[in-house]
Amino acid sequence: MLNELGHFALVLALAVSIVQSIVPLYGARTDNARLMALAAPCAVVVFALVTLSFIALTVAYVRSDFSVVNVFENSHSLKPMVYKVSGVWGNHEGSMLLWILILALFGMLAAVMGRHMAPSFRASVVTVQGWIASAFLLFVLATSNPFARLFPAPLEGRDLNPLLQDIGLAIHPPLLYVGYVGFSIVFAFAAAALMEGRIDAAWARWVRPWALVSWVFLTLGITMGSYWAYYELGWGGWWFWDPVENASFMPWLAGTALLHSAVVMEKRDALKVWTVLLALITFSLSLLGTFLVRSGVLTSVHAFASDPTRGLFILLILVIFVGGGFALFAARASELKAGGAFAPISREGALVLNNVFLTTACATVLVGTLYPLVLETVTGEKISVGPPYFNLTFIPLMTPLLLAMPFGPLLAWKRGDVYGAAQRLMVAGVVAVFLAGLSAWLAGAETALTAAFGVTLASFLIIGSFAELALRTKSAKGGFSGRMRRLFSLPRSMWGAALGHLGVGLTVLGIVALAAFETEVIVDMAPGDTAEVSGYSVTFIRAESQEGPNYRDAVAILAISKDGEDVTTLTPARRFYPAREMPTTEASIKTFGLSQLYATLGEVNEGKITVRLFYKPLVLLIWLGACVASFGGLLSLADRRLRIGLPAPVAKRRDEPDGVPEGAGV
Amino acid sequence: MTRRKARRLTLISVAGLALALAAGLVLFALSDKITFAPTPTELAEGKHNPGDRIRLGGLVETGSVERGDNGLVSFAVTDTKSRIPVTYVGILPDLFREGQGVVAEGILDVSGTLKADTVLARHDENYMPKEVVDALKAQGHWMDEAVTEGALNAQ
């Protein structure tokens, strides 16, 4: 009953979305306020209906209602409750429903919160959201109905893929989807601006919070996915340049560029056309990601089992929205007035440099991801493009960007002083070179160059990210406490920028530490044998079997000691899920500060085992850095000027320190 | 040339330089750093040179798996017509089995052995790596072996 209600709610949501796709826009064209006012209630109703539908599916999972095909194929009555709930989006149909739920949520928020926008503009934004929602609702109803029934109902389900029975599934997809889908609002804003043929600095101010929210969630989603793959797959890697990882990374790169160009537009009324184009590109890449993951054109750990109609349908949505967006851009962009000019060496210039490198890097990732598909279609030759390609193209393009990063916030708007900035970064540079020398000496011949190069970059970034904060508190009166007071009264967006850049530095440091100092041993062990990894002694005590709720474990107990003292125990396991007759590897990880010991278990044979042991120095920095950057994004979001949508009050402006212009934030 | 034009020009040249750098890197990387994905028969016919990076899909030949010390393992990948010897040091994936689908990726050495650094097996019971399906299809053996049952669900 509830299942049919859920299905019916989806159909109704489609109907209302179609109304939302037509009526407000017609109102805006004919200047009819009552028709335009229909936008918000429509968006609210769509959200309510999709929520109802999502709840219905969740209830079916919680109750293990195997008369629903989707539940039968992806659940099991013995599965722990948390995986029953997260299992709702552990499959194509359910995850698509979650996608639409988030889309509807964003659509509603944009419709309700956009009070300070011009009514016709707001109506256009909500209309474009309505188009996107209609397209995806139609897709789900036509090809991926999550409520399809099965008769007679089986007694037991097929269980969820064991790799997905993890807390990661509860967190990673929702975060990622908020990121992906959030950029749809940015797309809607861009399309509305093009339709209205009008755009100004206020547009950038409206778009920035949405872009920031999406960026923060996308960052966290990718980070969580990376950590999940790291501990769950048992390969010990944190990034594989897998096509599906790239699919989420491309919108991230474009979105990061968008955040920065929107600042220029907001502060200086420049880069308008480019910012609109970036907004279109970012969401187009989100859609491309959805297509790549769900169409089955790629081999990947993420690939959903899929049929060709779905791929074709999403391709159609992709073509319509991307093609439509760019056609609109081509037709109307010339009507948007170009903004003011600026010297190449200036804050704007630095932000343009950021955009040039981020979008170029994004393009190389796009080429690497799509090239195998294109080549196979055109010539039939089968190749794949992996880490060697991406390391060779991505790293050289990121290096100048990372080196330039600490300079950006130190340059003034309009006309900057690069020598002044260099002087201020002298300390960071000297420390960076010293640390680089030290780490090259520690690393030994093979990885000395990687260590020296990477540590220079990372430490320059980390120290340099504080340069602006330090500079702005320099003139504060009242000694140390005065400086501290000034420090915490600086605009939050400035803190956001500093933390964002700091986070990148920390992540780079983690990556470099791993590349230069990681150790790995693979060893056969009988009970009582000891192996060494980076100063830790690993002793194999015994193998034993353990029972879980819906699996069995073969566990190896490894005692870890350092300098003769027992530190901890590692328990890597081979896990077997009877419902799917599927084994998985359960890595065992212990954290020491920011570093980790990582063990996976291979063959277990007559009490003897093969173990793979890693020592991963500073590895946690990779993900912590991303979290710090996301926190920076949240701080920027809480900035006064975005909350109230007005320029900073005069009293505050008078308080600005000498020489450095106001409003640094990114 | 006005100052405004000069500034535009600087901007465009910077963007052009970055694009040229990127295009150069991409072209070089695509000519040198890609991974070929031949079938075992194509590889056995000598289409690729030692040193090439190969992603090889097929079945693990029954009876070919030999384990050495400390994670060393050797096996052969077959498409039922040709076989390619593979060596690997590491932990094999959970679903690695004789007679089952596998994808091995690594460098081809002079003797025609693939020194794999990555070995992937199917990761659930109704998924078959695309490379394996293609290799078997090319030999006309698709769907006539028990091991491929269920794989169609994924395609």
Image (cartoon, coloured by chain):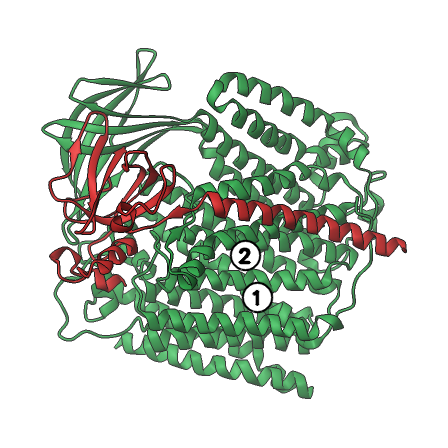
Chain colours: A green, B red
Q: Amino acid at mark 1?
A: Ile
Say which mark, if any, is on residue A185: 1
Q: Position of residue A494 (x, y in %)?
A: 69, 44
> Image height check: is A542 above or below A407?
above
Say which mark, if any, is on residue A206: none
CB of mark 1 within 8 Å of CB of mark 2? yes
Task: Give the CA separation, mark 1 to mark 2.
Answer: 9 Å
Say which mark, if any, is on residue A214: 2
Q: Position of residue A235 (x, y in %)?
A: 33, 38
In the image, A391: left or right of A469? left
| Residue A119 appears in view | no
| Residue A179 appears in view | yes
The residue lying toward the viewer, choosing from A93 and B49, is B49
Residue at 50%, 51% (x, y): give it: A249
Helix, strand or loop status at disc 1: helix
Q: Position of residue A457 (x, y in %)?
A: 60, 31
Residue at 63%, 60% (x, y): give it: A278
Q: Residues within 10 Å of mark 1 (few under 14, many from 20)?
A: many
In the image, B85: left or right of A311? left
Choose the circle earlier in sequence order: 1 or 2: 1
The residue lying toward the viewer, choosing from B1 and A452, is B1
Residue farthest along the right direction in this orientation: B2
In the image, A163: left or right of A335? left
Helix, strand or loop status at disc 2: helix
Residue farthest along the left direction in this orientation: A606
Which quadrant would residue A200 be assigned to in this image?
A: bottom right
